Amino acid sequence: MDINVAIVGYRMQSAPDLVTSRERLVFELTRGLFDDLGIERTDVDTTILDSNDFMDGRTISNVFIDPPAGVYMRDESKVEMDAANAVIYACMRILTGQYDTAMVVGIALTGSQASPYLYIEYTLNPTYERQVKLLNEVNAAAFQARSYIDRFGYSERLLDDIAALSLANAALNPNQARRISGITADKVAASAMYYEPLRELHCYPPTDGGCALLLASERKAKELTDKPVWIKGMGMSTETYYLGERKLYQSSSAAEAAQRAYELAGVKKPAQEIDVAEISALFAHQEPLLAEAMGLMGEGKAEQAYAAGETAIGGKLPINPSGGALGAHPVSVTGLMRVAEAARQLRGEAGDNQVKKAELAVVHGQDGVCAQQNAVLVLGI
């Protein structure tokens, strides 16, 4: 990319129930971000807000969070997809040369307001899927999980091992909503069955949360921080929503989005060059499925990779050292939180979740049933 763009600051927060308003959450995140960087709202050239009218229960929902974000009478736009897409949009605005700074703010109260599973069910095709009640987000994911593990002959125990690892990482992370001490694969296997083979702890938790991130051009970034995290590549891709036309054991759109990001970043061998990955895996099986699509893991090699500890914080290629979406999934904000968590890693600020010598990261966000749309960014220092 001709213009270098960096992440210069971030703030995030999540909980099962924050007991707050959207407006208060936005104010706390953005005001905290401004204070961290020593700036005011007038120093932000453009802002991308990520909120969802349907989930907020109000039309043009972004207008209600403009004031607490400090965006009134300022340049602003909106994204309703996963907020990793909002980061790409903000980056593109800086790449035009018209802006030096761009803030991305995402919020979702899908822990205290209503079940996110119910929200997503309402978005599915009303002409047959909703009428027949055959398909919702979780049983669609169960179809995907069964397709994946049967394709490669994996044991269902793999799902327990993946979830236990993510949840153990989440327990160390103060930014996560679901923090379970002493989690084990056996405890995951003992959780309530949702749709076979998915159990409660294989699935993301209902979560309130938000994240604010500031991007800056190279010139401005050097004024704002001595620890910039550079956006080296980005890509996005979408495939058909109709599950009958997709091979659920793989993700062609994640592969395409990753390839576009790698090409911009100059990454030739992602499994060897990437130091840490933050993947928006909403269900346990999606972590290796998406990792394979993104070239981070050999197809059909998931069981041996997890058994060997390759994806652990101290492993060959740590995946979701933050705990990922199994620790918190404020719907539509999760990809933005993955970006912030990757920046936290590259800046050496991840505390107990820190990966040693992390210099290059890949970040993923998804939207739609069974990861229909995917966004991928490559970050580096």
Image (spheres, rainbow, N blue to C red):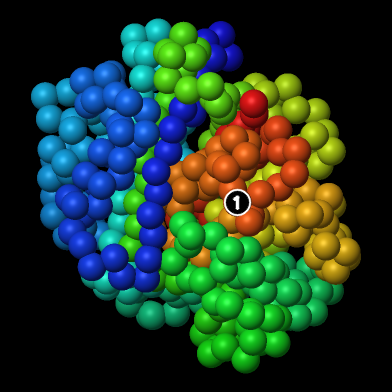
Across and down, in percent, residue 68 comes to 16, 41
Q: Amino acid at mark 1?
A: Gly
Viewport quadrant of the N terminus: top right
Name the spot of residue 14 as percent of width and height, x first.
Answer: 39, 60
* Horizontal relation, residue 299 to residue 361: left or right: right
Q: Secondary structure at mark 1?
A: helix
Q: Is residue 263 above or below residue 334?
A: above
Residue 82 visible at all: no
Q: Residue at x 70, y 81 (%)?
A: 185
Instruction: Count all numbered tags in the image, as a single digit.
Output: 1
Quarter where residue 307 is shown: bottom right
At 25% from the left and 38% from the top, the residue drawn is 31
Q: Residue at x 38, y 80 (%)?
A: 132
Q: Is residue 11 left or right of residue 193?
A: left
Identify the residue under disc 1. 351
Figure quadrant of residue 94: top left
Q: Nearer the viewer, residue 13 or 48?
A: 13
291 above or below 375? below
Tell me if I can see residue 219 in this picture: yes
Left or right of residue 38, residue 139 in this image: right
- Residue drawn 21% across the image and 62% down it: 20
Residue 110, how many percent across, how many down?
32, 65
Q: Residues within 10 Å of mark 1 (few under 14, many from 20)?
A: few
Q: Quadrant of residue 135?
A: bottom left
Above or below residue 335? Residue 289 is below
* Horizontal side of residue 112 vs 97, given as left or right: left
Q: Quadrant of the C terminus?
A: top right
Residue 72: percent from the left, percent from the top? 12, 30
